[in-house]
Amino acid sequence: MDLREYDTAKYHYYNTLNYNRLPLTSWDFYGQFLQGLNYNLSDLKMLENLTESHNWTSSFDFKKELQQENIIVVTDSNLKIVFASHNIVTMTGYESQELIGGSPKLFQGKATSKKTSAEIKKAIDARLPFEKTVVNYKKSGEMYDCHIKGFPVFNKKGELSHFIAFERAA
């Protein structure tokens, strides 16, 4: 068999097809969308693993929160970050892995309200949910308003296990 005949036939076949070509930049948008989707799926799996491994009694709709582009931050009972969703980089400039083991206080700065911080601390100490808007700082030092819904998370024995915060730029 002569491969030139095959190549010629294939060339003619593809040249006669009538299809629209997409500009290369459209693949950039699709790539970004696909990467975001993969990050959300990865975050969802990690959150489900945390829920299962620590026997949380609270059931949060993580999928809905991630679809609404909320940032999810989970700390242990000592307020050390154990999880931050990948989309945190868009709001703070920090990659999620940079935050693991750190404290949420790293987002605070000169313009952060002492009164609001004290109210959040009081709710955390009392193991109560809270909802506040605070002035935080990005990795670059730029200020932004952050709306936080925070919740204590208990295990099936009724012991405090973690804290979880759903955040978005205000």
Image: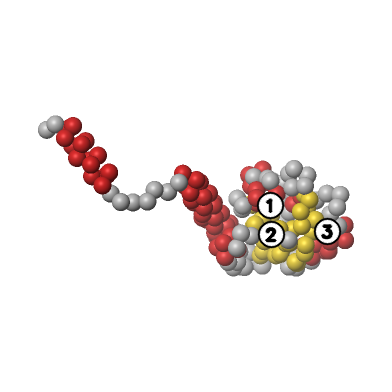
Q: Secondary structure at mark 1?
A: helix
Q: Quadrant of residue 123?
A: bottom right
Amino acid marked by disc 1: Met
Question: Which callout, 2 or 3, points at the residue further toward the start of the chain?
Answer: 3
Q: Nearer the viewer, residue 100 or 40?
A: 40
Give the residue drawn at x 54%, y 52%: 36
Mark-to-mark CA distance, 1 and 2? 8 Å
Amino acid marked by disc 3: Ser
Asked whether residue 148 appears in the rendered view, the answer is: yes
Question: Which callout, 1 or 2, points at the residue further toward the start of the chain?
Answer: 1
User: For mark 1, what is the residue?
Assistant: 91
Residue 160 place in picture, x, y as percent: 69, 62
Q: Nearer the viewer, residue 27 or 40?
A: 27
User: For mark 2, what is the residue?
Assistant: 168
Asked whether residue 160 appears in the rendered view, the answer is: no
Question: Which callout, 1 or 3, points at the residue further toward the start of the chain?
Answer: 1
Give the residue drawn at x 80%, y 56%: 135
Q: Please say if 166 is above or below 142.
A: below
Amino acid marked by disc 2: Arg
Asked whether disc 1 touches disc 2, contact meaning CB atoms under 8 Å apart, the reply is: yes
Which-is-in-front pick, marks 2 and 3?
A: 2
Count neighbours of disc 2 (C-alpha within 10 A) and say few if under 14, some if 14 to 19, many if 20 or more. some
Residue 28 place in picture, x, y as percent: 50, 46
Residue 5 place in picture, x, y as percent: 16, 35
Count neighbours of disc 3 (C-alpha within 10 A) and say few if under 14, some if 14 to 19, many if 20 or more. some
Residue 14 bears which disc, if any? none
Which-is-in-front pick, marks 1 and 3?
A: 1
Looking at the rendering, in which quadrant would you find the N terminus? Answer: top left
Give the residue drawn at x 66%, y 65%: 154
Q: Quadrant of residue 131?
A: bottom right
Looking at the rendering, in which quadrant would you find the C terminus? Answer: bottom right
User: For mark 3, what is the residue?
Assistant: 117
